[in-house]
C-alpha cells in the first residue's frame, strides 16, 4: 500500500471512531485505558481484546463496526495506559510478560469485564473476542471458567500452557485461522481441536486458504480481503445465534 493509501486509511479510521469514548480504569492499582461504545442500554456485549500493538485505532474501528450491528463493546487494555508499542522488541516484551504471568492476564481480563459492567455493559449476555495476542488472551479467559456465552479468536495464539486445560470452559468457541499462518501452525490448530473435543467444549474451527497470520488487519501486507470478509460474516452469525 502506498503512502497516500495509508494516509487515507488513517484518516478513515480517525473519523470513524467518534461514537464511543476512551475509558480510564484501574486494575490492581495500575492505570489502563479501554474503549467503550454502546448503541443502546442493555445491548448484548462483546469484550474485545487487542493484538500485540495494544489498543489502537484498529480495535476501535472493529468496536464501532460491532456497535453498528447492535452490540455494546468494551475494548480492553492489557498493557497499561499509554503503552502502545510500535517496535517488535517492545511488543514481544509486553506480551511475553503476560504469557509468563497468566494470573495477571486473567485479572486484567476480569478487571475489564468489571469496568464494562460498571459502564452499563450487559456482561450476563456477552462474548469475548480477540486478535492475535488478544486471541490467546481470550483462550486464557475460556480456560479460566469465565461465565461468558462464547469465545472467538481471529488468527490468535492457540497453544495451551502446561498444566492448563478446557475442563472449566463454559461457553462455546469459534476459532478462525489462516492455513498459511507460519507463526501459529496447523499442528497447533489440530492440537487445540483435539483438546476441545476431549473436554467436550462446543466449538467450531475454520481455516482460510492462503491467509497468513494477521489476515484481518486492514492496510497491512498480510491483509486478505476474502478471509477477512468470510471470517467477519461467520463471527457476525455466531454473535447473532449466541447472544440472544
Image (tube, helix red, strand yellow):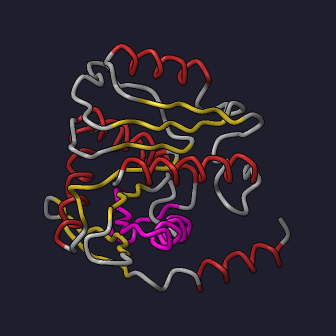
Q: Position of residue 24 (x, y in %)?
A: 27, 76
Foreground pick, 52 / 70: 70
Q: Quadrant of the C terminus?
A: bottom left
The residue that appears at 29% across and 41% down in the rendered structure is 141
Reply yes or no: does residue 79 show up in magenta.
yes
In the depicted view, which residue is nearer to us: 112 or 73? 73
What residue is drawn where x is 57% and y is 81%? 16
**Magenta-colored span:** 57-85
Residue 241, how many percent across, how many down?
A: 42, 48
User: Looking at the image, is 237 positioned above or below residue 172?
Assistant: below
Residue 155 part of the magenta-drawn span: no
Measuring from the top left, give residue 221's x and y in whole percent: 77, 53
> Where does the image place residue 186, in percent across and percent down from the top left?
61, 23
In the foreground, 127 or 140: 127
Image position of 240 (left or right of 103) = right
The quadrant where residue 22 appears = bottom left
**Relative height, residue 194 to residue 129 (above, below):** above
Is 41 situated above or below 234?
A: below
> Which quadrant of the structure image shows residue 117?
bottom left
Q: Quadrant of the N terminus?
A: bottom right
Horizontal side, residue 182 vs residue 163: left or right: right
- Seen at 40% across and 17% down, the residue is 197
Task: Check the image and name the residue furthest to the left.
Answer: 29
Amino acid at each position: 500500500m502506498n503512502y497516500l493509501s495509508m494516509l487515507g486509511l488513517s484518516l478513515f479510521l480517525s473519523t470513524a471512531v467518534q461514537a464511543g469514548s476512551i475509558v480510564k480504569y484501574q486494575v490492581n492499582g495500575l492505570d489502563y485505558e479501554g474503549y467503550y461504545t454502546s448503541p443502546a442500554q442493555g445491548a448484548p456485549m462483546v469484550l474485545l481484546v487487542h493484538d500485540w500493538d495494544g489498543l489502537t485505532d484498529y480495535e476501535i474501528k472493529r468496536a464501532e463496526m460491532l456497535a453498528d450491528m447492535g452490540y455494546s463493546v468494551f475494548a480492553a487494555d492489557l498493557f497499561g495506559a499509554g503503552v502502545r508499542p510500535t517496535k517488535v522488541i517492545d511488543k514481544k516484551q509486553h506480551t511475553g510478560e503476560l504469557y509468563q504471568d497468566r494470573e495477571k492476564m486473567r485479572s486484567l481480563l476480569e478487571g475489564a469485564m468489571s469496568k464494562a459492567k460498571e459502564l452499563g455493559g450487559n456482561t450476563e449476555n456477552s462474548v469475548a473476542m480477540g486478535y492475535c495476542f488478544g486471541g490467546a488472551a481470550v483462550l486464557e479467559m475460556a480456560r479460566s471458567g469465565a461465565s461468558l456465552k462464547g469465545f472467538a479468536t481471529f488468527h490468535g495464539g492457540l497453544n495451551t500452557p502446561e498444566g492448563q486445560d478446557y475442563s472449566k470452559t463454559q461457553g462455546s468457541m469459534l476459532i478462525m485461522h489462516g492455513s498459511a499462518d507460519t507463526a501459529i501452525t496447523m499442528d497447533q490448530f489440530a492440537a487445540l481441536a483435539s483438546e476441545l473435543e476431549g473436554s467436550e467444549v462446543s466449538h467450531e474451527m475454520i481455516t482460510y486458504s492462503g491467509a497468513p497470520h494477521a489476515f484481518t488487519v486492514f492496510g497491512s501486507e498480510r491483509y486478505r480481503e476474502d478471509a477477512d470478509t468470510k471470517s467477519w460474516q461467520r463471527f457476525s452469525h455466531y454473535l447473532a445465534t449466541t447472544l440472544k
